[in-house]
Image (cartoon, grey):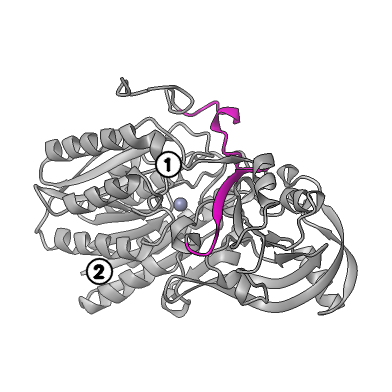
Amino acid sequence: MRLFIATLGTETNTFASFPTGLDDFKACLWAEGNIETFPASPWTSPGQIWLERGREEGWEVVQSLFAFANPAGPTVRKDYEAMRDRILGDLAAAGEVDAVLLYLHGAMVADGYDDCEGDLVTRIRQQVGKRTKIGVELDLHGHVDNTIVDASDLIVIYKTYPHIDHAERAHDLFELMKRLLAGEIDPKMALFDCKSMGLFPTTMEGPMIEFSKAIIEAEGKDGILSLSLNHGFPWADVPLAGAKMLAIADGDMGVAAEAAKRFGEWFYRIRKEATLPFTPFAEAIEEAKIKGEKPLLIADTADQIGSGAPGDTTYVLKAFIDAGIRNAAIAPLWDPLAVNICFQVGVGGKLKLRIGGKYEPHSGPAHDADAEVLFLKRNAWQDHLADERIDIGDVAVVRVEGIEVLLTTLRTNLYSLSLLTLHGISFDDKQVVSIKNLYKHKDLFVDNTRKQLFVATPGTSNPDWSALPFKRVPRPMWPLDADPLGLDG
Ligand SMILES: [Zn+2]
């Protein structure tokens, strides 16, 4: 067998005003035919797993491009086309292959392309014909419609949010592809449109835990090969937006369609309870004034880079200062200029520093501070899962009116507490810690915080969907419309 593998992804916030270009891919993941030489990370793992497992099977594995960028605005057209054409060119040069495995995101939008994944997979299908099998792994925050379903044989989507199963799903997809190539299964894929958008964590106390368990238990039974709920990415104004339920059945499209509808309607019925609750900003600052036994955690949701925001707003910093809150930490805040200035001054140096508020109109005002440099590190990282690392560039930690602020040269979320502890910031003794994340609830903070608030801060990724200027999402769409499927009765 000959297997061709590639990775191309980013999550596009169409409301973000700064574009995603080649440099953003090169700063996050850029591997040309040598994915095994990169450290394990959420972006490298699927490709590495397929390479290793393909070789274990005795297959010849042809590696193409592996490129991933952190979320931001739409990808520059020529850059998307260059990466797409690179993969198509590598595939043509590879000659005949039995299977193609692709790790894509699902929510990649480029100028002129609402659906980069659909475009890429359709072109691959046109190039390889029907005999070659195509399998795709996607993030659950993507947009899926019948374009990509029709063009591929197998699609497996993450099941967890926060995302901790990219490697597990890569194994699932490989296993299904192996069975397909052996002639053991005949996958039929069906999609059910849940006509809903939002954020639906799978680890909150709530109905998604049971739902997620049920779809896993249903796999491998009654002709069902795989079930995936595509949650959709709510900051994208595209015609294929919204949550969709995908079912793959063995040989029977009727079974796939029935399962997609059954689980899609189940999700629809729990969608309200499953939605991440947001706290108004002013309310969160009032709560932050309270000194509890454990820290309060504030997720600065509208400026979290995971949904395409720059990660450099200073609204929380200013609100803490204005509220007289001092024993606090803010991490991370993207500001390469400020980091470089801190390196010039050195640890212990004191300076007037302009923090944040630089990159796009949503970045808001910078904060001019009297700062003291507490910690510096080049080529820093944070840990993720068991053996994965997230590069965060150079780091400077400064103290501003008692508040410790961690500045980075690469845009990042907080993936683990090592972002603080590896860089000299303690967590447990803080009154309040603000992170530029959306949701890391149970996984990280359930035991070591007194409360976690997902705060509707100002910024790019406003969580009040009804306030966003949607023009192209299909209607009706919950919560913009009350009950699109008419099942609330
Ligand atoms: Zn995601």
| Residue where numbered disc 2 is placed | 2
Give whichever of 133, 437 is nearer the camera.
437
> In the rendered image, which quarter contains the C terminus?
top left
Mark 1 beta carbon near ligand 1 (under 8 Å) = no
Q: Is mark 2 within 8 Å of ligand 1?
A: no
- The residue under label 1 is 232
Viewport quadrant of the N terminus: bottom left
Q: Which mark is residue 102?
A: none
Q: Quadrant of residue 99?
A: bottom left
Is 159 within the magenta?
no
Residue 24 position in % (x across, y down): 61, 59
Classify 10 Å Cα crowding around label 2: few (below 14), some (14-19), many (20 and above): some
Rendering coords of residue 210 (x, y %): 28, 48
For the residues labelled 1 and 2, the Cα–Cα distance comes to 33 Å
The kind of residue tagged 1 is Gly
Relative placement, left or right, of 434 versus 115 is right
Q: Is residue 465 magenta?
A: yes
Asked if the residues shown at circle 1 and circle 2 are in contact, with their CB atoms under 8 angstroms apart, the answer is no
342 displayed left or right of 80: right
Q: Residues within 10 Å of mark 1 (few under 14, many from 20)?
A: many
Amino acid type at image mark 2: Arg
**Which numbered disc, 1 or 2, marks the residue closer to the eye?**
1
> What range is drawn magenta here?
447-473
Identify which residue is drawn at 71% across, 54% down.
312
